[in-house]
Image: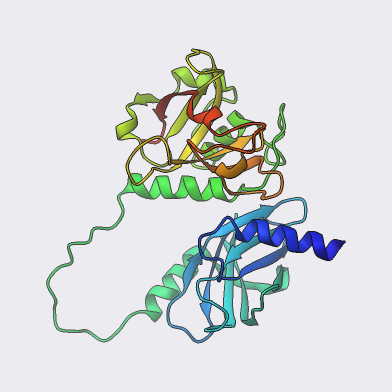
Amino acid sequence: MKKILFSSLFLLITATIFAESLPVVTIVNNIGKEIIAVVGGPTDADDWEDFEIIDYNHRRNTLSFQLLEPLSKVNRYDIIIATDDNELYFKEDVRITRNTQITFSRRDHTGMNLADFIDFADLEDEEPAQPQQPASTVQPPSASQQKRDLLLHEAKALLGIPYRSPSSPPSNFDCSSFVSFVFSKLGYTVPRASSAYSTTGKVIEWKDAEPGDVLIFAQSAGSSRIDHVAILYKKSAAGTLAGSWIIHSASVNTGTSFKQGNAVSKTGVVITELGLRGDGRIENEYFYQRYMQTTRILD
């Protein structure tokens, strides 16, 4: 029965990502700290990538991430994780299979923090001087964009945490305590009550909305009473509300609108797509039809 249940969970998780041929790896966190990032790549490769965390189970202290290459091409990886105090932990030459589970503990500590790693990586990448090339037209991310990226990174680190009202962050969240907690990671103080968001930040038009802005939803379509808040995760390719993704703490089964989070309950901290029908009991048009406004809090 346990084997059947595990297989079902694995299929549910892999159904939420676009390339089913790419394996999902589970990390068991025995460090006692929050993992905020997973980086790595094939052993002996020159370049490493930032792996996307697709599921975080705080009760079991596990998280899952997706590899970037099929196992038919690569099956040995170096993995490095960063914790919420910016300390780094390292596993070298890990053999990856379809059901790989990697345990990180304090003995895997590198003795380096994130700043040390960045400086070290920069030194390793230095090459002998080359003939001067025309200046690149590619500009580094602005301070505002970096702040938005960091906000979404903090939000994604909470995926899978259950919904509860009243809540006790970070063990559980309701919709407003989730938004408040995420913004507090960047030093912002925002309300713990969704109703207070009507006077928080700056109201902007949807066409100007960017990931990291706060979306406010009414109690029912056409109502002026605020009932739900979420963070805009990704705008649709067409720039429309329908098809855009939000990250939020949901009390209802988000059905086929579910993208990432707890793939079994599809509740709690999840990423969902606006405008898609759900499972019949509730539909994500429940959020889409109740959209009120977008508020900008990040400066």
Please say whether residue 78 is visible from this viewpoint. Answer: yes
> Whole-percent x and y of residue 225?
53, 14
Residue sitting at the far front: 280
* Image position of 92 with respect to 272: above or below: below
Left or right, residue 210 beside residue 153: left
> Whole-percent x and y of residue 264?
71, 49
Residue sitting at the far top: 224
**Residue at figure coordinates x 42%, y 70% from the top left:** 119
> Whole-percent x and y of residue 16?
58, 55
Tell me which corner region of the image, top left, top right, bottom left or bottom right, holds residue 236: top left
Please say whether residue 35 is visible from this viewpoint. Answer: no
- The C terminus - image quarter: top left
* Image position of 32 with respect to 257: above or below: below
- Asked whether 109 or 225 is in front, the reply is 225
* Image position of 196 with respect to 123: above or below: above
**Residue at figure coordinates x 64%, y 34% from the top left:** 280
> Whole-percent x and y of residue 294?
40, 28
- The N terminus - image quarter: bottom right
**Residue at figure coordinates x 58%, y 44% from the top left:** 256
* Image position of 288 with respect to 172: above or below: above
Q: How many marks?
A: 0
**Residue at figure coordinates x 62%, y 41% from the top left:** 255
Q: How is the image coloured?
A: rainbow
